[in-house]
Amino acid sequence: MDKTNVESRDYISRALIFHVDNKEHEAVIKLLLTAGADTNAKDEDGLTALSWAAKIGYEAAIHLLLAAGANVHAKDKNGWTPLWWAAMKGCEAIIIRTLLTAGADVDARDKDNQTPLLWAARIGYEAAAHLLLAAGADINAKDKHGWTPLWWATRKDHQAIVQLLLQTDKVDLGLKDKNSRTLLSWAAGDGNGPIVGLLLETGKIDADSRDDNKDSQTPLLLAARNGNEAIIKLLQEKSRQFRDD
């Protein structure tokens, strides 16, 4: 391919990204693909046309690009794939299903070691979390902080996702983050009574458990420090039940 043809194809490929990003009519995208646009060309941030289509929820473009050979695993500069963008932006279920059917890696990691499920839990997109779990996403995947999807859902107070994750009965409730703190410790310290209740209802968490860091605090001490009477009472009740059993 001579220089003129290379430059022409580069121009058409950039035009493809531009027109997908601006959600142009499918006929324009078909024309560019027919003209030889590179479906895997990237913009300055490393996004392909497919990543842009997933980011803005452009279903028709996603089908066209995949049919034309777009790489469903392509990562941008943050390590985010099209599935990542769909999960992070809370796209409609059909878009996430389409990408998964095309072979998207449900546990793809970004530069912070986070997966699409981690982000769905962090942002609070319950529908995306449902689909990713059904596709076999690692429910205990840890990011660079040592936090799992349940940690993010807890810290961001997404109670519906906390319930969803707990209902799978696959969550490792004994995990500790890089600061050697437990999930219950964080929830009690944040003053999040409803989630403290959900965690204790599993019957798999010791209300008197201590963090393994230098402070070695219990959830009760953290709740007391913040003056949260409701959590204090809940933890004391569960502690008594544990001793009685």
Image (cartoon, rainbow, N blue to C red):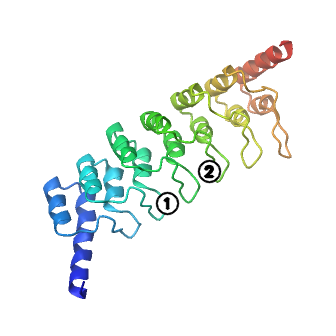
Residue placed at 17% from the left, 53% from the top?
26
Mark 2 touches mark 1? (CB < 8 Å)? no
Q: Secondary structure at mark 1?
A: loop
Label disc, if present, on residue 79 of the rendered structure:
1
Quadrant in the rendering for residue 9: bottom left
Residue corresponding to mark 2: 143
Quadrant in the rendering for residue 191: top right
What's the distance in space between the residues labelled 2 and 1, CA to CA? 13 Å
Question: Which badge, 2 or 1, is on the more N-terminal residue?
Answer: 1
Whether residue 182 is visible, yes or no, is yes
- Tell me the quadrant of the picture where the C terminus can be found: top right
Q: Is residue 93 placed above or below 1 in the rendered structure?
A: above
Q: Amino acid at mark 2?
A: Asp
Q: Label 1: how many residues lie within 10 Å, few (<14), some (14-19) or many (20+)?
A: some
Whether residue 25 is visible, yes or no, is no
Quadrant in the rendering for residue 21: bottom left
Q: Position of residue 35 (x, y in %)?
A: 16, 69
Q: Amino acid at mark 1?
A: Gly
Q: On the picture, is 71 further left or further right than 196? A: left
> Extreme top residue here?
244
Q: Is residue 53 placed above or below 147 in the rendered structure?
A: below
Label disc, if present, on residue 219 of the rendered structure:
none
Residue placed at 58% from the left, 39% from the top?
139
Q: Position of residue 230 (x, y in %)?
A: 70, 20
